[in-house]
């Protein structure tokens, strides 16, 4: 995943993630540069998906936004 591309689309991606996994909150989706692993860890706990599955989902959503 391209970090610059990811950051530019983050607000749109947050909305899509909330639609996909209804139990996510804004706090769960807090993105702090350099702490991506913490974000993925929170999402893993809430969704039950693996880190690779979550990354793949975000990559697919990014492609749809382009």
Image: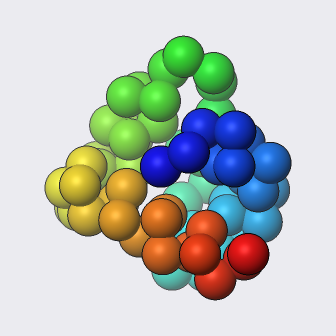
- Structure colour scheme: rainbow
Which residue is at 47% across, 30% downward? 36
Q: How many marks are shown on the rendered structure?
A: 0
Left or right: 32 in relation to 47: right
Q: What percent of the width, then of the height, locates residue 24?
A: 54, 60
Q: What percent of the width, then of the height, locates residue 65?
A: 72, 77
Left or right: 12 in relation to 26: right
Residue 18: which quarter of the image? bottom right
* Residue 32 in view in this figure: yes
Q: What percent of the width, then of the height, locates residue 14?
A: 68, 60
In the depicted view, which residue is nearer to us: 17 or 24? 17
Question: Compared to 54, does 19 lie above or below?
Answer: below
Q: What percent of the width, then of the height, locates residue 2?
A: 56, 45
* Residue 47 in view in this figure: no
Question: Compared to 2, does 34 lie above or below?
Answer: above
Quarter of the figure with the C terminus: bottom right
Left or right: 29 in relation to 45: right
Which residue is at 69% across, 49% downward? 5
Which residue is at 23% across, 55% downward? 52
Which residue is at 38% across, 41% downward? 40
In the depicted view, which residue is nearer to us: 49 or 3? 3
């Amino acid at each position: 995943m391209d970090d610059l591309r990811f950051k530019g689309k983050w607000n749109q991606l947050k909305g899509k993630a909330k639609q996909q996994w209804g139990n996510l909150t804004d706090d769960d989706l807090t993105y702090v540069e350099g702490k991506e692993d913490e974000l993925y860890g929170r999402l893993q706990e809430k969704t039950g998906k693996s880190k690779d599955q979550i990354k793949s989902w975000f990559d697919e959503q990014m492609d749809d936004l382009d």
